[in-house]
Amino acid sequence: MDELKRTTDTTDLPAEVAKLSYGQQMDQQSDAELRNLRRFFLKHPSLALTFGYLTASIMGLIFTISLLDKFQFNALPYLELSDFLLAAIAHPQTAIYLMTGICSVAFTVWFERLSRKKYQRYALWIDKYYRSSSFLPNWVWGLSAFVFYLVFFSSSDTPKISQAIKAHQTGQYQLSLIYPIHPGGKEIRQLNEVQIITRTVSYLWIYHQDQVKLIPHANVAALIPVLDKKPDKQPDKKPEPNAEKPVVAQEAVAREPAAVPGKN
């Protein structure tokens, strides 16, 4: 009977008697891994910066591919190895998403542990989900969540940005070229009402006349932003009457010749 009681699942017991095992084991294992990771990065701080920059670069690269895919354009054949390192600089919002994700994960873990300590029923319910499986260990779930985060947050803004570009709601530029291009057999050296989609090391990706065009940086002579013309703030304002007009009238009257008296 004693052996049977030991093998009984603790979640079937009342809340006052049940013992939590999987959640506490997971917390202890996570704390130990975080301590080891902190010690490693303290010894090698440059590797922490490198890992963060590479992660932001991957997010920037996914952002570029996803954004151009909204225009039915496959950007992979035109990307170079340098674009992988430039992606984080060309799209700095990816670094913001990365920091936001790290802070949100840390807050979620802290809040979940606090909830398990405060609410015993919740702790009993969630404890069985912390049990590690031989088929899907916990590190697989963690890696899957990390990849999902990279892909989802890197491409979450691309639909809104592409719609704004197609609706001509972004900034427009006047692009002058060094060497002319010949779309439709016509020689063109200047492109008006150009919208910039993104840029890579070798190309400037623009949206012009409802088409995606690649312009090499070596062929760009000038890129001038088109400023919106501000309308007249007081269009209905009437001009003030000229105060000199009555004076001119008086002078005109004074200059009229006097009547010559006639002879009797």
Image (cartoon, rainbow, N blue to C red):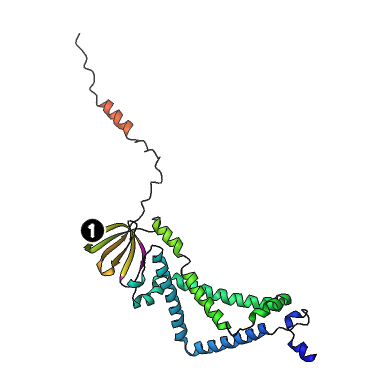
Question: What is the quadrant of the C terminus in the image?
Answer: top left
**Residue 100: percent from left, percent from top:** 52, 72
Looking at this rendering, what residue extends furthest in the left direction?
263
Question: What is the quadrant of the N terminus in the image?
Answer: bottom right
Near mark 1 (Cα within 10 A), the count class, few <14, some 14-19 or many ≥20, is few
Quarter of image, res 210: bottom left
Along the line of sight, the residue nearer the viewer: 40 or 188: 188
User: As displayed, is residue 260 above or below residue 86?
Assistant: above
Quarter of image, res 182: bottom left
Tell whether position 183 is magenta.
no
**Residue 128: percent from left, percent from top:** 67, 80
**Residue 57: percent from left, percent from top:** 42, 76
What residue lies at 39% left-to-right and 57% top-to-bottom? 166
Looking at this rendering, what residue extends furthest in the top direction?
264
In the image: residue 96, left or right of residue 123: left
Judged from the image, the secondary structure of the residue bearing numbered disc 1 is: strand
Q: Range of the magenta residues?
A: 196-202
User: As displayed, is residue 250 above or below residue 166?
Assistant: above
In the image: residue 158, left or right of residue 190: right
Along the line of sight, the residue nearer the viewer: 72 or 104: 72
Q: Amino acid at mark 1?
A: Ile
The residue that mark 1 highlights is: 188
What residue lies at 43% left-to-right and 69% top-to-bottom? 63
User: As displayed, is residue 3 above or below residue 77?
Assistant: below
What residue lies at 37% left-to-right and 66% top-to-bottom? 198
What residue lies at 44% left-to-right and 64% top-to-bottom? 158
**Residue 29: percent from left, percent from top:** 61, 87
